[in-house]
Image: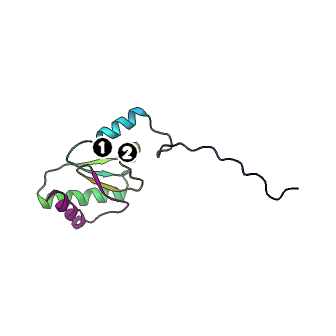
Amino acid sequence: MSLFGKKQEEPKKSECCCGGACNGETMEKAEAAKASGASVKVLGSGCAKCNALEAAAKEALAELGMDTSIDHVTDFSEIAAWGVMTTPALVVDGKVVSFGKVLKKDEVKTILQKLRG
């Protein structure tokens, strides 16, 4: 009688961060969107926190007199292409500047002034 049995191997998980839901076409689309130029993006599912970050970013852009539009990215494969695993996230000019928290308007203004000032 054995006290310690062999552990059964767990099935191998997908190497992809989205659990295998992406394919070549969706990854190409995500990489193309990632490579786009000067812009502000909010990455998130569309929850209340993501919407709050988007509103703060709009207010900050308006106060600074910047005419940049804000894209709200909800496609998980595109979010994963940015390397973001915790939303909401803020991307300014192709660089992830914040993730996992809702920034206040003044925090977004400070970031925008530093990156674009």
Residue range of the region highlighted in magenta in the rendering: 95-117
- According to the image, label 2 marks what residue? 81
- According to the image, label 1 marks what residue? 34
Q: Amino acid at mark 1?
A: Lys
Front-lying residue, 92 or 3: 3
Location of residue 57 (image quadrant): bottom left
- Which quarter of the rendering shows the C terminus? bottom left
**Picture coordinates of residue 45 (x, y %)?**
38, 50
Q: Residue at x 19, y 58 (%)?
A: 115
Q: Is residue 101 on the magenta stretch?
A: yes
User: Disc 2 on helix, strand or loop?
Assistant: helix
Q: Residue at x 16, y 56 (%)?
A: 116
| Mark 2 and mark 1 residues within 8 Å of each other at the beta carbon | yes
Q: How many marks?
A: 2
Q: Is residue 24 on the magenta stretch?
A: no
**Picture coordinates of residue 17 (x, y %)?**
47, 46
**Picture coordinates of residue 1 (x, y %)?**
88, 56
Q: Residue at x 19, y 47 (%)?
A: 38
